[in-house]
Image (spheres, rainbow, N blue to C red):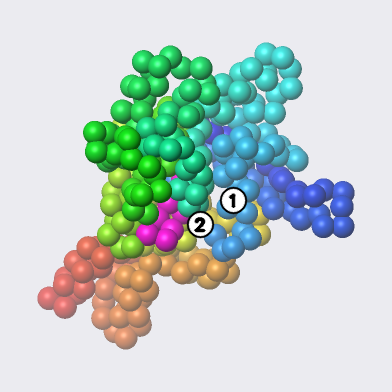
């Protein structure tokens, strides 16, 4: 199963003097069980793309399908199926902690399941499970006001609110923005655990090439509303010219190895993580 975009285009304020095309004939598939990263310069269409993946906006051209269900189907049966399909996709916006509004962490996480009509027993089970998934101890945090928590804790509570809806596909828009280095690392490891340990399909929007190199299995690069690169990160980072045209650069370690090679050290330039780069340099100097 998958989320599929078939020749999707989207234009904001169509038919007005302020008309702007954000996506142009994008076709791609996010396969169930994958970890996909999306990168691109500001204005490249990243946010518009992920809103389509989540069914938050309808394309002005083309189709979006979640597990083969067309989200734009206007028939009576189609509308009901599309509503259920949208629930399979959870969207975590940038700075999700700004959306916390209940008096306690438990009440905030329970808000979504309660709106779905879940029983109180199921709501309690979902809250416990979601807090465990993001590493928040229920006994410690369930009665705590969200606004008294640290930035990282608030963000995990906000993500737990999305997970309590039991999505199959999880979209995270810059989930580490504004966190300190320790908080970033903890958040990224928890996201990886959601994928590896719990089987969530992850779509990660990030400006950090280092984070993408470490965690993603596949990378999409957007430029002016089109997908210009779609491959494993190690292959994408070799496309230096296309990356630069898209306002991006390979990870620092990759650029460092490229510099060493230009200066005559016979090192491979396909390493994308610190560990890979260190091994490549040690091997080259020992030859």
Q: Secondary structure at mark 1?
A: helix
For residue 39, which numbered disc appears in the image? Answer: 2
Badge 2 local density, few (<14 within 10 Å), some, or many (20+)?
many
* Residue picked out by circle 1: 47
From the viewer's perspective, is 224 left or right of 50? Answer: right
Distance CA(mark 1)–CA(mark 2): 10 Å
Q: Nearer the viewer, residue 165 or 105?
A: 105
Residue at the bottom extreme, as displayed: 263
Is 212 left, or right, of 279 in this rendering? right
> Looking at the image, which residue is at 72% across and 14% down?
76
Q: Earlier in the sequence, mark 1 or mark 2?
A: 2
The residue sitting at 28% across, 52% down in the picture is: 186
Q: Position of residue 62 (x, y in %)?
A: 71, 37
Residue 250 % position (x, y) = 42, 67
Residue at screen point 27% across, 33% down:
138
Instruction: Pinpoint residue 107: horizontal percent, then vertical percent.
Output: 42, 31
Pick the front one: 183 or 66: 183
Label 2 sits on a secondary structure element that is strand
Main secondary structure type of the part rendered in magenta:
loop
Locate residue 66: give its quadrant: top right
């Amino acid at each position: 199963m998958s989320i599929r975009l078939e020749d999707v285009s989207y234009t904001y304020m169509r038919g007005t003097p302020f008309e702007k095309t954000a996506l142009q004939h994008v076709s791609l598939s996010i396969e169930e069980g994958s970890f996909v990263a999306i990168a691109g310069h500001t204005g490249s269409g990243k946010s518009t793309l992920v809103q389509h993946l989540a069914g938050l906006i309808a394309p002005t051209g083309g189709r979006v399908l979640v597990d083969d269900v067309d989200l734009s189907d206007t028939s009576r049966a189609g509308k009901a199926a599309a509503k259920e399909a949208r629930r399979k996709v959870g969207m975590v916006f940038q700075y999700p902690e700004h959306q916390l509004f209940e008096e306690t962490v438990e009440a905030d996480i329970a808000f979504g399941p309660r709106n779905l009509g879940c029983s109180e027993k199921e709501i309690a089970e979902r809250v416990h499970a979601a807090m465990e998934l993001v590493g928040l101890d229920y006994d410690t945090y369930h009665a705590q006001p969200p606004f008294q928590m640290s930035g990282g804790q608030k963000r995990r509570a906000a993500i737990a609110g999305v997970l309590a809806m039991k999505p199959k596909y999880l979209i995270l828009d810059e989930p580490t923005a504004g966190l300190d280095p320790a908080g970033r690392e903890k958040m990224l490891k928890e996201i990886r655990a959601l994928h590896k340990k719990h089987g969530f399909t992850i779509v990660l929007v990030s400006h950090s090439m280092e984070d993408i190199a470490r965690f993603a299995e596949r990378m999409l690069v957007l430029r002016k509303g089109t997908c210009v690169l779609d491959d494993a990160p190690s292959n994408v980072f070799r496309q230096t010219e296309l990356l630069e045209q898209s306002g991006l650069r390979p990870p620092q370690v990759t650029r460092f190895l490229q510099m060493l090679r230009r200066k005559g050290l016979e090192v491979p330039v396909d390493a994308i993580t610190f560990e890979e780069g260190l091994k490549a340099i040690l091997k080259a100097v020992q030859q």
